[in-house]
Image (cartoon, coloured by chain):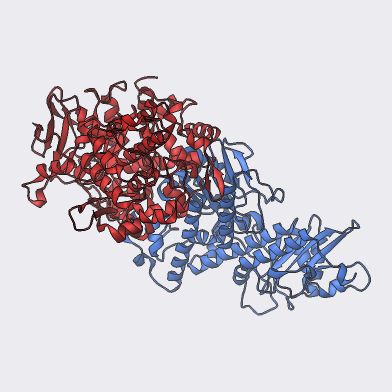
Chain colours: A red, B blue
Amino acid sequence: MSDPSFGIHGKILEIDLSAGYVRVRPLDPSLTADYLGGRGLATRLFYEAVDPASDPLGAENVVVLAPSPLIGTSAPTAARGHMVFKSPLTGFLGTSNSGGGWAWSFKATGYDALVVKGRASSPVWIDITPEKVDVLPAGRMWGKDIHALTDELTTGFEPAARPRVLGIGPAGENLVRFAAVANDRNRVYGRCGPGAVWGAKNLKAVRAAGRMKTRVHDKERYQSGYEQAMHLIRQAPVTKRLLREMGTAGLVELINVIGMLPGRNFQDCTHRDEDLEAVSGETIAKTILERAAGCYLCPIGCQRHTRVGGKGEQAEAGEGPEYETVVLMGPVCDIYDLEAITRANYRANELGLDTISFGSTVACAMELAERGLIPPAELAGLELRFGRAAVLERLAVETAFRRGAGALLADGSFRLAERYGRPDLSMSVKRLEIPAYDPRASFTQALGYMTSPSGACHLRGGYAVSLAFFGGWKEIPRFSLLQSPIAIRNMQNHGILQDSLGVCRFTGYAFGSEPWSRMLAGATGLDFSVARLEEISNRVAALERLFNLEAGAGKLDDALPPRFAETPIIVAGEERAVSVEIQERMRRDYYEVRGWDAEGRPRPDLLGRLRIAGRRP
Amino acid sequence: MSPRDWKADEDLLRLFQTIGRASLLCDIQDSHSGNMAVKVRNAAGVEEMAITATGSQKGDLDAGQICFLSAGGTDYGYYKASSETDIHQRVLALPGVRASMHAHTKDLTIVTLDDAPKPSPVPDFVPVDPLGRAYLGDHVHVDWFAVPSGSAEMADLIPRRLAGHPATIIQNHGTFARARTLGEAFFLLGVADASGRVVRQAQKLGVDVGALRGRIASDPAAHFPRLPGPYEIEDDGLCDFPEETELLAEFRKAGARIFESRLSPFHTGTMSVRGVRDILYAPKASLPREIGGPLRRLPMASAPSDSAELAVHKAIYAETDFQTVMHVWLPEAEAHSRFRYPGEEGESDKIVPLDAEGGFLYLVIPVLPAEAGEEEIIRNLFDYKIAVVRGGGVWAAGTQSLSEVLHHPSSLREICLYRLGAFERGLDLRKMEPKKAARW
């Protein structure tokens, strides 16, 4: 093993808010070798620290944040952090990733992971520098939105020394189960409700201001991977142009062309062209876009800095909307009003809401209301039905503060639909809302949603769409039952690698593991061959599964809502649904390629091979 | 027989048409060259010969350009048929032979040219590639004829040559092959031309082919430890997975590209997509669009009956998460595997791209020794996705699709061609290669 100070600092920062201690413990070098950093390391540290039966909103839940060995180098997009916790929305593994500069800044304070345990008796925030770590009262910040919080904690610093702030807004404070944690104002750890976990811990923010460098062991080896990666990013159409020019919302028209863009709470995938055009990436670029930008160290630049409302009193500026937000708050609610979507997006960013879960929960509520299942009196005077753009912004605010009709939405679509006797109307898997790609239009994507460790997430579950339509030479069939289980396993594994390296999913449009292997081996001096990276991904996947099993998940949780089996959509002239039989076959085959048994339990020989000691048989 | 009776049935016509078009695609014919002949049984149960008409365009044959020789009477068929009908007729009379074909295998023909005064004996062609060794043997006769087209001397000697060998070369003209089926004859001619291409490119790269032949002759097994198995003529129409319509289309696309881009001669190479318990496998990966080959669904578990190539596919899947595997016999790669940098000892163990595209896709492509085992191949596939085995073809693996795995040998061919072109121009490859490549 080479000098462990290359790529990492060798230190974990652990803070117990109940006990009030801050301690620094060494990072076992074998953890870097076996789990990298980011998602892998965070999952490993989380697994050893938390009781799977714990209440996600209780003091016993644990939050782990980890940058990666590549963060602090020049590796493209390598500034993303990963957060692992028990999700208050799903009850299973909460695993969420974000761009922005916080993870870079945190690593530069000299730590490779942050573990937060316990619960403070009153609101606190944490200030981390290379010299010291302080847990400070946050009473005056409680109630502030994320932008105001960020301003407060970054004012008075020179630009070069400006710290980065990771924090929650009112949604997190009010324990909204899909509340986000944000850094750089609008970069969010959105999925699975980490904001509620922070809120439950009375943790408002973590500020990091570091200057320590990440040392690179073999610059030439590192550089060979870097140059290859940069060349391919500048060459691939999606990374060199589409995302910069149109943002992720550039996908709106494309995903519609392939019959995969959902509408009306996933009741169908049909839209009028002129409606979609009104919310497309092209229209955003032509009408509300002020400038594009990128996350720290990102050469792709998909951020949308926008302005709505002209120059009058109603004018405001912010970020977004991105593809998922456009579709979930838009067509899935039968809304094609770009300004309404954008304003609701601004509120979600400020207040700290995951826009996917929020949009889908609104759509679920709209369907319940249209079916007469929600008594009007419970809607606090809100006229809720598909297509009502006017409700979006108001619902975002009310949800974050758990008031009015928003109080119904604040626990997510599954609990909402269950409350009114129709859990099948929640378009979720493991209670996490499905993103903006209809699973009936790709079996591979369907299987990804089913088997994602965090519930229906296109990023943790495998971004099959990216391969099926923009994969270039990796393009895969959409409806191959034979290929889907392995295709999605491989995509999930590549996602684990990216999350564990702290890099953006979009790099996958340009290249696979090989450049990362060289950059990582160059940075650390450790053996990170592609084979080794593959093994690491399999190890993390198995550990995530173990946790979910221990938290009570089973085979039946790896299933789509009945709508996707029972109600076909038309794709390229053919009726397509993901029948129960197809789901069963894909699930069975997926378990097998993962080395899990028929109930989805990692087999002992797999655990032995991957050197994982589970807590329970 | 009147011209009106002269109609090949649909299957026979299609066979001639498709082989004719395919032979143009792989550039072993000119617009009107070559000829094809098969034995067929007529309606009366009598065996007769069907042969292409003289001067016909093999890529655009119509039914009237397939001639049947009548046993008696005015032999309209004979007069319209190929000028080399006599040769084919005698070849088809050989035991077990049901098809013969002649093509202008240019790469092979060029490497057998000489400038010695004639008449004089011509040395045999000695293959230095695995396909040539496996299917043509350790030598192929090359004969000079005073009249090297349709002559009586040819009709006398060529059948005698083909009695002992599957193919024979006419200096300055091309190759004849005899086989059980027309498809097999075309296969042999494709292999023969590719074998010539390996030698031709090796010569261009400055390889001492004579010395190489000497080394191979002294220990052929060490140079070709894993030769491909016999060419099978059965089951070309077989498809075990018609329900996988999207994958079927992928196999056909990839197969056509392998053939048309000359990544592997007709009906050579293998490719597969893995399922959970089984693999979809094309044992004849190089497939022209109009000509099929077996597409098998096979159990993932290894079996004693597995061919050497299939065994490697299964081993790769057993040890890795790869979803697709391809093995091709790329002549350019085989030639490069013998390359020695001027002034340096030993054959190079890597191919370093000079072109921008190749360079960013692969810093280097490893060249493994002939004896490389599955483990070494797999290890290299992990790191490079593609590996050349000297005397053992090119292996590639993909994480997702057949298209992905196809891209590797396709890129490798271009990489080799750029290197070859630069070397031919007298450029110093070492100076052109990235310095860091020496370390990888």
Q: Position of residue A69 (x, y in %)?
A: 25, 42
User: On the rendered image, what quadrant is the N terminus of chain A found in?
Assistant: top left
Please indicate whether residue B138 sits to the left or right of residue A290 in the image: right
What x and y, as percent, mark residue A351?
A: 21, 39
Judge whether B1 appears above or below A346 on screen.
below
Would residue A434 appear left or right of A196 to someone viewing this image?
right
Q: Is residue A384 visible?
A: yes
Q: Nearer the viewer, residue B52 or A281?
A: A281
Report the side of A421 relative to A29 (left or right). Answer: right
**Residue furthest out toward the right:** B73
- Looking at the image, which is closer to me, B239 or B307? B239
For the point 23% across and 55% down, which residue is it?
A: A309
Q: In the displayed orientation, state which residue is furthest to the bottom.
A: B117
Count of numbered circles in the view: 0
| Residue A205 placement, left or right of A223 | left
Residue A246: horizontal and vertical position, in percent?
A: 33, 57
